[in-house]
Image: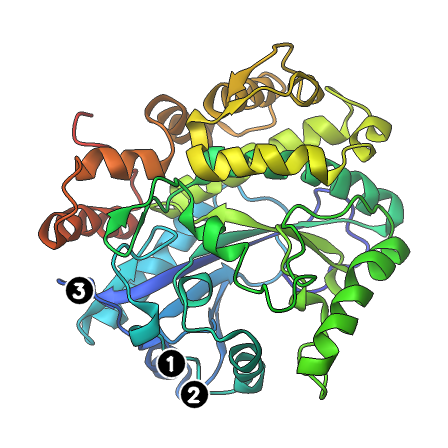
Amino acid sequence: MSRNQNLHLFEAFGIELEYMIVGRDRLDVLPVADRILRTVAGKQVDEVERGALAWSNELALHIIELKTNGPVAGIDGLSHLFAEGIGEINRLLGGLGGRLLPGAMHPWMDPARETKIWPHGYRAVYEAYDRIFTCQGHGWSNLQSVHLNIGFSGDEEFGRLHAAIRLLLPILPALAASSPIMEGKATGCMDNRLQVYRNNQRRVPSVAGRVIPEAVFTKRDYDQQIFQPIYSEIAPYDPEGILRFEWLNSRGAIARFERNAIEIRLLDIQECPQADLAVCAAIIGSLKMLINGRWSSFEEQKTWDRERLIPIFDLCVAEADNAVIADSRYLRALGLDRTTATGQELWRHLIESCLADSLIAAEHMETLETILDQGSLARRLLAAVERDFSPKNLQTVYLRLADCLQDNCLFLSRDH
């Protein structure tokens, strides 16, 4: 989402969807993103505009991103636009024996062996990351996500938006987890993408911090407490300043002041755009309720320290929708007057509250009901695998998942 001037809170959004390129039949990693962009543009580029969407590269050659081509006024109706772009890319990949695979992690990828870093255009950035952090790992080349950008104008709107997002971040994996399988087996964690993401920059700890951002609510405080410590700590490893930009910040939500937006980065990508946009709609509606003060005031939201939020986040990363949240103050801050609730129960409350206030469009509700009734995509994938982690069975299940992306339809476990 490029710079949006004079657009106020909830008047500008940007959506970015990342997908893995794999072989059409075996689903092994296929590093040909550059060939797709070159075919469309007629020359080697890092990004190509396709009407209302843009396609771009990522760090690894087997990842391609589709995103809104600039800020949009709302997200309703975008599902079909993204589905058209996915269909076009799949047609191009067909000639290379490939297709796109959704889900936040490839279930059997060996990143040490299969990762190929983007070698074109702004490759200096990726080479710097690789030199400092060594990007041949799951936390760099095997994690596909949705980035939701929400615009704001000025410090007042930034502060309110950041406070609300910080409060909601810990439970996002309870709704969006889609990475329960890594290296051919279930790890016991429902959101392995976030588990590896939070540790991929340990050499310079301030870059990702503790994933949940610090309690800062002005541009000046954000610069002093987040940006400057990051730039100071990275400097010995990046003397040329190649990475000294706002996007170096890798927290779960990052301030992009150059484009007046906060970018939420904690969402595992789902099985299709229909699901991704529904998840984004639930988040946007819940943030509107928080900012409107329906459940808790701005002053109260500002008081939430990371030490109280991180344990909830940890639970949801591990157990997703089945996480039992036993912090009654947190539940009350989100409008649920109970001593405990599962992530699934809390999200049902949030979504039903938003629906009652007409903050979620009808087009998203059937999808959200499926997620609430059958569980996160991570849980549905495990149910479909049925404890058979043989390569043949994993391939069968993930072929179904790839078909869901092509058809823009939901992935259901076998008994539905």
Q: Nearer the viewer, mark 3 or mark 2?
A: 3
**Can you name the residue that lies furthest to the front here?**
203
Q: Secondary structure at mark 1?
A: helix
Q: From the viewer's perspective, tell me whether residue 123 is left or right of residue 228.
A: left
Q: Which residue is mark 1?
A: 34
Mark 1–mark 2 distance (CA, rounded to whole Å): 7 Å
Left or right: 337, with 181 as reference point: right
Question: Mark 2 or mark 3, which is nearer the start of the sequence?
Answer: 3
Residue, disc 2:
44
Depicted 293 relative to depicted 251: above or below: above
Count of numbered circles in the view: 3
Q: Which image quadrant: the N terminus?
A: bottom right
Residue at 56 percent across and 33 percent down: it is 171
Circle 1: residue type = Asp
Inspect this view and state whether residue 278 appears: no
Q: Residue under circle 3?
A: 24
Image coords of residue 247 (percent x, y) = 66, 66
Q: Are marks 1 and 2 in contact (CB under 8 Å)?
A: yes
Q: Nearer the viewer, residue 72 or 201?
A: 201
The residue located at (19%, 75%) in the rendering is 95
Could you tell which of marks 1 and 2 lies nearer the N-terminus? 1
Percent x, y of residue 220? 90, 57
Who comes first in sequence, dot 3 or dot 1?
3
